[in-house]
Amino acid sequence: MSSNTPAPGPSRAELGFTQPQFWLLRNLSKNDISSDGHDMTIPELQQAMSSYIRPEDDLEAEAEVLVERGWLTRDGDGRLWITERGDEARASLKQHAPAIRARIHQGIDEADYVTTLKVLQRMIDNVRGEAQAS
């Protein structure tokens, strides 16, 4: 790495969280995606995240980790709430987002990145079209 190249930022793993955990915190925080900061169930969170959650993401297991950390609480009906500590963690994690993005994109030309996303989206659309046509 040259002296002009900034050191890459920390990874999510180095910060001790996963992307689905960050999404959970963001979707439950009135200071972020949630309009009111009210509680949500796992199915409600899955619906809220349907445009970006992956099939392998286990929100129930990810939420349990956050409950154990004291970042979320679960009421008697299984509804999840973000705690003050959880919102503080969310804000701290969000501050690292630009550095994480820089690390992921390090050495990748912006035009190549955009082209890659377009190609991948087209491939996804093609597969969805085949599944619907079948």
Image (cartoon, grey):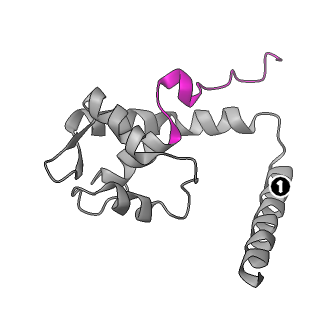
Query: Can you say whether 27 is above or below 109 in the image?
Result: below
Quarter of the view holding residue 93? top left
> Which image quadrant: the N terminus?
top right
Q: Residues within 10 Å of mark 1 (few under 14, many from 20)?
A: few
Tell me what residue is drawn at x 52 percent, y 41 percent. 19
Q: At numbered mark 1, what does the secondary structure look like: helix, strand or loop?
A: helix
The answer to if 15 sits in the magenta stretch is yes
Q: Which residue is found at the position 30% from the left and 50% from the top?
A: 29
* 35 relative to 49 in the view: left or right: left
Question: Please, what is the dominant secondary structure of the magenta stretch?
Answer: loop
The span picked out in magenta is 1-19
Q: Percent from the top left, x then y, of residue 74?
A: 20, 44
Q: How many badges with numbers are in the image?
A: 1
The residue most toward the bottom is 133
Residue 91 location in percent, x, y?
37, 38
Q: Foreground residue, 131 or 103?
A: 131
Asked if residue 10 lies left or right of residue 33, the reply is: right
Give, as a three-letter code, the residue at label 1: Thr
User: Residue 9, image x and y in percent?
Assistant: 61, 26
- Outermost residue toward the left in this view: 76
- Mark 1 highlights which residue? 116
Q: Residue at x 84, y 58 (%)?
A: 115
Q: What residue is at 52 percent from the left and 47 percent from the top?
A: 57
Quadrant containing the C terminus is bottom right
Q: In this rendered view, identify the residue nearer to me: 103 or 127.
A: 127
Please say if 53 is above or below 70: below
**The quarter of the displayed image where residue 41 is located:** bottom left
